[in-house]
Amino acid sequence: MKKTIKPEVVGREGTVLLEAIRRLNRRKAVAHLLKLIDKTHPADIAWVLRYLTPEERHNVFNVIAQTDQIGEILSELDQSIMLELVDDLPPKFMVTVLKKMASNDAADLLEALPVEVADNIRQLMARADREEVDDLLQYNPESAGGLMSPNFMALHEDLSVDEAIRAIQERSEDLEMVFYLYIVRENNQLTGVLSLRELLMHPPYRQLKNIMNPKVIAVNPETDQEEVAHMVSRYNILAVPVVNHAGKLLGIVTVDDVIDVIRKEATEDFFQMAGAGKDDEILMKSIRSNAVTRAPWLCASWVGGVVSATIIALFSGELQKYVILASFLPIINGMGGNIANQSSTIIVRGIATGRVNLEEVFKIVFKEMKVGMLLGGIYGLFLALVVFLALPNPSHLFLVASISVVLEMTLAASIGAFVPLVMKKMGFDAAVATGPFVATTMDIIGTTTFFTTAILLLN
Amino acid sequence: MKKTIKPEVVGREGTVLLEAIRRLNRRKAVAHLLKLIDKTHPADIAWVLRYLTPEERHNVFNVIAQTDQIGEILSELDQSIMLELVDDLPPKFMVTVLKKMASNDAADLLEALPVEVADNIRQLMARADREEVDDLLQYNPESAGGLMSPNFMALHEDLSVDEAIRAIQERSEDLEMVFYLYIVRENNQLTGVLSLRELLMHPPYRQLKNIMNPKVIAVNPETDQEEVAHMVSRYNILAVPVVNHAGKLLGIVTVDDVIDVIRKEATEDFFQMAGAGKDDEILMKSIRSNAVTRAPWLCASWVGGVVSATIIALFSGELQKYVILASFLPIINGMGGNIANQSSTIIVRGIATGRVNLEEVFKIVFKEMKVGMLLGGIYGLFLALVVFLALPNPSHLFLVASISVVLEMTLAASIGAFVPLVMKKMGFDAAVATGPFVATTMDIIGTTTFFTTAILLLN
C-alpha cells in the first residue's frame, strides 16, 4: 500500500503541474493528459486552467470534457473562465455534464449562462433533474436557498437506530456530507438532528426521536449568505439545515460552501472601500472592464479635487502673501486621509466580526475622536518643531501648521468612524460609500480648515 | 417534543439576551442567571460579555465560573477580555477549568497568560494533562501544530469494520469531530483515511486497510496556518491530519478552527494596508494602545508630507509666479493615492485568493499601467476641460494639469501593483509595507512630477 501524503499544489508544485499539462498539450499526448487529469484533484486542474493561454485552455478543456471530472472541475473554475469554456459545448452535452454535478453547482452554472443558452439546456434535461435545479434557481444566489444542496440525509423520527443504519447504507453516494442526520416527522417537518457518531452510540432498537438533539440551529431559504456564514463560524457547525416557514426541511448548507462565502465577504468590504468594486474577478478581466469598475470611485475623488482646487483658488490672495502655505497642503490632506482610512477600516472590520455594537455609535466615534486628537497632537507637535527649525522666519506659521494637523486628524478620525457606522445603521452596506465619501470629504475639510486657520492666525 | 429552530443571536436577539443578563445580574438573581447561562450557547454568552461594563462582566463571570460551560465560554472570548477575567481566578481553580477545555484551547489560554501565571498553573496540572498541553505549546501558534487537536480517532489498519465500530462506541465523548477515521499502522504511521459513512458501507469482517482511502491530504506541524486554510478551502475537506516528518500522526486541524484563520487572514492584509496593525482586537483596546498601533503608518505619511513640503518649497519661485498651481496639488496627489490604493488592494487580494501568478509580475504590472493610463487619460481630459472653461487666462495651465494627472495615475497604478508583487516575491508579507510605502511614495512622486511638468511647459 503506497502512502501519498499530498502537499498543497499551489506554489512550486503548481508550476510543475502547469508545465506538465502545457507540454502534454503541445505534444497532443491526449492519453497521457487524460491520465494526468484523472490523477489530479479537480481544484488543482481548475487552478491550472487559469494560467493557460485561451488557446491552450480550449484544447485542454476538450480533453477534460472526455473525463468524469468535468462537472467538478467546472464548479471549481472562476466564473469568467467557466463561461468562456462552456460556450463551445453543445447543449446536449451540457445536459450530461450537469447531471454529473451537485445540483447546487449545476444551478449556479445555469444561473451564470446567458438566459437563452440556459433555457435551451433546461429543455433537454430529464424532468426530475430539471425540477431539482429549478427549485434551487428560484432563490437569490446570495441566500441560504441559493447555497443549499437538496441532497441531504433525512430520516423519520420513528425509525430505530438499526433501521437508520440500514437506510444510510442503502442511500447512494451522491449525498452531501452524511455526518449529521436530520430527523423529520410527517411532511418532512424538521424535528431534530443527530450526528453519525451519536447514532452509533445507541442500542439498535432505540427510536431516533428518543436520542436526537431537538435543538436545531436552522435558517430559512431567504436568510442572507453572510448570516449563514456568521452562524456556522459562531456555533462551529458543519452544516445548517434550511427550513421553510412551515418548518419543512428543504436542504442543507455545508461548511465547504460557507468557507467560500466567508472568504469572499470578508475581503469584499475592503475591496469596496478601496473603490475596486464588489467584483472579486477583476484580475481576470479586460483592461476596459477593469477600468470601468474602478472609475466611479476615482470620479468621487476627482470631484473632491476640483472642489479643493476651487477653495484654494478662493484663498489665492492669502497664498500670494504666504506662498509657503502651499507646501503644507499635502501633509494636512495626507494625514487626514490616512487616519480617516484607518478609522473606517477598523470600524468596517469591527462590523464584520461583530465587535462593533451598533447601539454604541456615539461611544465608538467619541473614542476614535480621542485617538485622532492624541495622534494629531503628537504629529502636530513634530510639525511645529520642524517648521520652527527649518524656516528663517517662522512667525506664526508653525502654529498654523500644527493646529491644522490637530484639527484635521481629530475630524478625520471621527468622520472616518462615523460614516460606516451611520451607513450600517441606516441599513446600507457599510463599505460601499465609505471610501470615496470619506476621502473626498477629508480633502475638502482639510483644505478649508487649513486656510481658515491660516487667515485667523496670520492676519 | 418541542422543536426549537434557533435563529442567530446577534442583532435584536442579542440585545434581548444582553439586557436579560444585565437585569438578572443587577437583581443578583444567581439561580436565574445560572439557568439562563446553561440554556444559552457558549458563543452567545461570550458575545454578551463583550458588551458588559467591567464590573458587570466580573460579576457575571463569577456565576459562569460555577458552571460546566466556563471552559467553552473562555475559549470563545476575545483574548483581552479572557485575560482580564482569568486574572482573578486562583491557579488551582484554573486547573479544573483547563481540564474542561479542549487541549488546543487550553494551550492557547496558557500561551496568552503571563509566563509566571501560566507556569504556576502548569505545575498544578495532572501530569498527563500537562504533557498534552506542553506538546502543543512547543509549536508556533500560527502553524498547523499550534492549531491542531491531539484528540482524534486513529484505528489500526488491521482492524475489521466491526472492531472499528466497537472502538468508536467505546471512545469517550471528548474526541473532536469523529467523521473521518484515520488509519494507522505501527508507531502511529498514517496510512489512510476513511469517513464514518464509508465505514458503514462495508461488511463487518472486512479489514480497514482494504477499504480506506490511501491518498491522504496531510500537513506537517510547521505548516503555516494560512497554508492549512488554503488546503481546507481548496480541497473542501473537514479536517486535515498533521504528521511529523517520519509520517507519524500527531493531531488533526478541524474546519471550525480553520474558519477563524480564514476570517482573520483574509481581512488582516487589508487591515495592515490601512496601517491599522496586525491586531484584530484593536477595537477592544484603550485609546493609548490603539494610537500606538496606528502611529507607525501615520509616521511614514508624515515624513512623506514633510518631504513633499520641502519639494514644494524648492519650487516656491514658480509658485510665486503662478499661485494657481497650488490649487492642483490636492487633485494630483489625491488621484494618484487613490488609484495606487486600488491597484495594491486588487493585487493583495489576488495574492490571497491565488489568482495572481507570481511568475507573471511583469505582465500584471503592465496591465495595471495600461489601466492607469486609460483612467488617467479620461480624468486628465476632464480636468483640462474644467481648467480651460474656468480660468480667464488658462495659457498652458490646462496642459500642465492634464499631463500631470495622466503621468501620476499611470505611475501610481504601476507602483501600487508592483510593490506588493515584489514584497511577496522577496518572501515578505505583501500587505505590511504596501500601504505606507505606496502612499508616501505617490505623494512625493506626484508633487515632483507636477512641478517638473509645470516648469517645462510654463517657461
Image (cartoon, coloured by chain):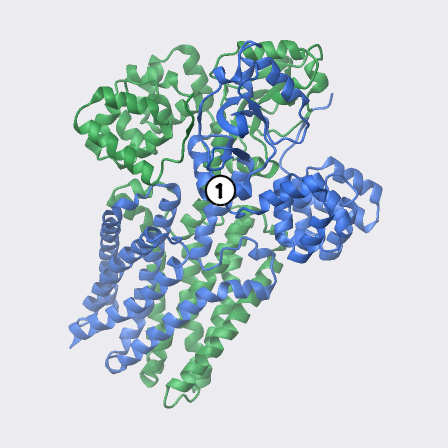
Chain colours: A green, B blue
Residue A40: quarter of image: top left
From this view, report whether residue A342 is shown above or below residue A397: above
Q: Amino acid at mark 1?
A: Ile
Q: Is residue B258 above or below residue B212?
A: below
Judge from the rendering whether residue B377 lies leftward or rightward of residue A202; answer left or right. Answer: left
Q: Quadrant of the N terminus of chain A?
A: top left
Name the outermost residue toward the front. B186
| Percent of width and height locating residue B140 | 52, 48
Residue drawn at (52%, 68%) of the image: A410
What kind of element bears circle 1? helix
A213 sits to left or right of A341: right
Question: Residue B106: x, y in percent?
Answer: 65, 44
Mark 1 neighbour density, 10 Å: few (under 14) some (14–19) many (20 or more): many
Q: How many marks?
A: 1
Using the rendered image of the protein, determine whether residue A307 is visible from the camera's viewpoint.
Answer: yes
Looking at the image, which is closer to me, A288 or A155? Answer: A155
Measured as percent of width and height from the top left, residue B208 is found at 52, 17
* B319 vs B52: above or below: below
The image quadrant where one finds the C terminus of chain A is: bottom left
| Residue nearest the observer in this picture, A390 or B357 | B357
Q: Where residue A83 sits in the image (x, y, percent)?
A: 30, 29
Residue drawn at (29%, 14%), measured in percent from left and top?
A92
Q: Is residue A368 left or right of residue A395?
A: right
Image mark 1: chain = B
Q: Is residue B422 left or right of residue B199?
A: left
Can residue A191 be seen at all in this image of the molecule? no
Residue at mark 1: B262
